[in-house]
Amino acid sequence: RTKRDVCELPFEEGPCFAAIRVYAYNAKTGDCEQLTYGGCEGNGNRFATLEDCDNACARY
């Protein structure tokens, strides 16, 4: 997948219950948002920091 493909994916929290704070790009709003990731599965639209999310997606 390209960065563009990852940024177009909807955020998936996954089925686990770890409650990890991550950032994901919201293609509808054009912004990176802080969300809660369960810790397993999900997809590539998940970044450890706001800066990582912005660098990957905010300007595509």
Image (spheres, rainbow, N blue to C red):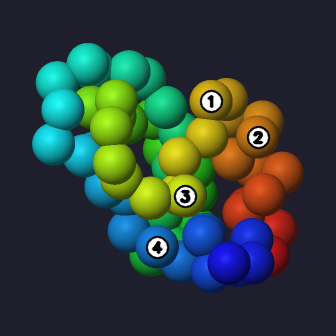
Q: Quadrant of the C terminus?
A: bottom right
Circles 2 and 1: CB distance less than 8 Å?
A: yes
Residue marked by disc 1: 48
- Circle 1: element type: loop
Question: How many numbered markers are drawn?
Answer: 4
Of pointers 4 and 2, the one earlier in the residue sequence: 4
Q: What is the CA distance from the residue labelled 3 to the residue labelled 4?
A: 8 Å
| Residue at 43% from the left image edge and 23% from the top image edge | 21
* Residue 14, image x, y percentages: 25, 46
* Residue 51, image x, y percentages: 78, 36
Q: Nearer the viewer, residue 39 or 45?
A: 39
Q: Quadrant of residue 50?
A: top right
| Circle 2 or circle 3, nearest the eye | 3
Q: Which mark is residue 52?
A: 2
Q: Which mark is residue 6?
A: none
- Circle 2: element type: helix
Characterize the local packing of mark 4: few (<14), some (14-19) or many (20 or more) Cα atoms within 10 angstroms.
some
- Circle 4: element type: loop
Residue marked by disc 4: 9
Amino acid type shown at disc 1 = Ala
Residue marked by disc 3: 44
Q: Is residue 43 left or right of residue 36?
A: right
Q: Is residue 19 visible?
A: yes
* Residue 19, image x, y percentages: 27, 20
Amino acid type shown at disc 3 = Gly
| Residue at 44% from the left image edge and 58% from the top image edge | 43
